[in-house]
Image (spheres, rainbow, N blue to C red):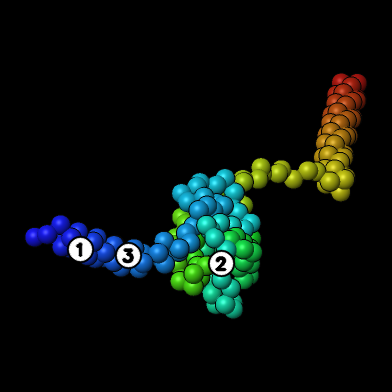
Amino acid sequence: MSRSTFISRLGALAAGAALALGAVAVPALPAAAHDSLVGSDPASGAVLESAPEQLVLEFSGALMTLGGSSTLVVVADGEGRDWVDSAPVVEGSRVTVPLADGMPGGAYEASWQVVSEDGHPISGVVPFTVDAPAAPSEEPQAPEETEEPEQTPEATSDDAVVDSEASDEGDGLSAGVIAAIVVIAAAVIVVVVVVVRRRGRRDSETSAR
């Protein structure tokens, strides 16, 4: 094999290798151009002391807005309820999602889907937890029963008058009975005295005859 032939073959092999590397590298270029999520507020896995007012997603490049359906965000609690209050707002590489008031404590998942700068849709999930106390129950609680002390009836003025009259009647009756006994006793004494005197006179007259 001559030197010129060897050089020609070596050049052909180098050209083939370059073409093969180019074929492999060219399809990879669009994939490398896809945007990705670089940050969020709340951050992924964050534990919050109070419910957030909004969700903010930050991407590596400006997003495409192809109508209202190009950007979709759902912030769901453990029961599957969506707390997104209004449509997401896309500003360059940032997506802001207003959230409804009254989010209870618990685990949440923010599922998002956007259209990358190269026209490819990308999606992901940002989990976070709200460590707020549960909302108080609206059911009224029955008041505790307390025993009321027994009240003794107080004597009224009418009752006092009746008691006074009964006392007066009792005192009057006792005095009348005593007076009657005294009168009867005096009458008996008078009768006895009269009888004794009459017998004495009769005895004297009989002795004189």
Which of the two labelled residues, at mark 3 and mark 1, occupies the earlier sequence position? 1
Which sits in the foreground, 53 or 194?
A: 53
Q: Is residue 207 visible?
A: yes
Q: Quadrant of the N terminus?
A: bottom left
Residue 8: give its label. 1
**Relative side of 77 to 169, left or right:** left
Which sits in the foreground, 123 or 136?
A: 123
Residue at point 89%, 22% (across, down): 204
Q: Position of residue 188 (x, y in %)?
A: 84, 32
Q: Amino acid at mark 2?
A: Leu
Residue at point 78%, 43% (across, down): 154
* Total residue callouts: 3
Label 1 packing within 10 angstroms: few (<14), some (14-19), many (20+): few
Local secondary structure at mark 2? loop
**Relative side of 113 to 56, left or right:** left
Q: Is residue 128 above or below residue 180?
A: below
